[in-house]
Amino acid sequence: MSSTIELPKLYEQAADFMPLLGTDYIEIYVSNALQAAYFYKAALGFSSFAYSGLSTGNTEKESYVVIQDKIRIVLTSPLKSGTAIGKHIDKHGDGVKTVALWVDDATKSYEEAMKRGGRSFMEPTVLEDASGKVVQSGIYTYGETVHMFIERKAYSGVFLPGFEKWESHFNPPSVGLKYVDHMVGNVELGAMNTWVKFYEEVMGFTQIISFDDKDISTEYTALMSKVMSNGNGRIKFPINEPADGKKKSQIEEYLDFYEGPGVQHIAVATDNIIETVTELTNRGIQFLRVPTTYYDTLTDRVGEIDEDIEPLKELGILVDRDDEGYLLQIFTKPIEPRPTLFFEIIQRKGATSFGQGNFKALFEAIEREQALRGTL
């Protein structure tokens, strides 16, 4: 059974041995970083920010950093065969490798995580250039995904040492994306509670919401999910695992094609979802759609809302309400060749939950896409 818990009290209870200031960046390993950067700019409204590659002295990999308000995405490709990056792409396809967390002390964060059972990815390392120094360290989470701790209080450069400002004449207007609201991980059957325990014990997170297969199910498929949050509520990581169903669930499909656990989707916030989704649609982004009958009883389910129903219906935007307010949300189709990584666009108008009332309609929409792919 699902349960929504009063967030402020929970945040006060969360351990503070590892204060996290926010999401620093998300690094996605891709086959062609230059082309991916163009897509993120042209279709998703990001702008050029920083670059590392041959011209900066990096002969192993090329990275383009794109930015939109507080969201920074690093798109990285290998420059040679046989590299760890290349092997990661070969196995998983394009996907999230690093969720970097902004901290005040990267060494202390690493030490706290390690003594609580974390698995090391990178010991504290100092990067320096003329603009100062950055300390970074890292630990593994589910699958091959990594959390990097980034300490940049002594750095005034554009992004990180080894990067230079990326100047470009092509910077389309923003679509209104503001910050990362949450990131969802998919793990194998029976592993969800293992990773819940990891975030509780290693990183001091608290479980704020839990959904079981009675909450998240259709006639054919089901999944279970628990939402973990850090102490100040800025970092939220829902973790999904498949549940028994008549057919292959979206989580199983993801695990099959990603060939292991990983980040399923990145939820990004906007202050005006109608304007944002309209612009994204005009730029070619495809979204999951629910039947138009969803909107016939919308106000009966969620009460009065500020928005007109007609544009929500036209765009396929979903609405849900909790005790704190309501939210509007929509999900893109996968943005990679494999049916793995996608984005959620979310606007919160008081609500602190994750759209439980939309789960059934959403998952039926996903199942229709799975049927078209022949993977249901």
Image (spheres, rainbow, N blue to C red):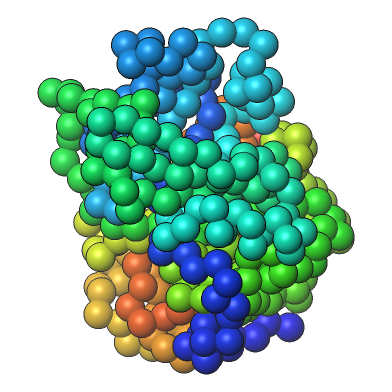
Residue 364 to residue 259: above or below: below
Q: Position of residue 221 (x, y in %)?
A: 76, 58
Q: Quadrant of residue 124?
A: top right
Q: Quadrant of residue 164?
A: top left
Which quadrant holds the C terminus? Answer: top right
Q: Position of residue 48 (x, y in %)?
A: 24, 32
Q: Is residue 200 left or right of residue 336?
A: right
The extreme top residue here reads 81
Q: Residue shown at 58%/80% (left/top)?
A: 14
Q: Position of residue 184 (x, y in %)?
A: 58, 56
Residue 95 shows in this picture:
yes
Residue 24 to residue 75: above or below: below
Residue 293 shows in this picture:
no
The extreme left residue here reads 169
Q: Nearer the viewer, residue 184 or 63?
A: 63
Q: Is residue 45 left or right of residue 133?
A: left
Q: Is residue 127 left or right of residue 48?
A: right
Q: Nearer the viewer, residue 112 or 22?
A: 112
Q: Nearer the viewer, residue 148 or 322?
A: 148
Which quadrant holds the N terminus? Answer: bottom right
Q: Residue shown at 43%/30% (left/top)?
A: 75
Q: Residue shown at 39%/42% (left/top)?
A: 134
Q: Quadrant of residue 217?
A: bottom right
Q: Residue shown at 58%/62% (left/top)?
A: 237
Q: Position of residue 205 (x, y in %)?
A: 61, 71
Q: Give the tally of numbered discs.
A: 0
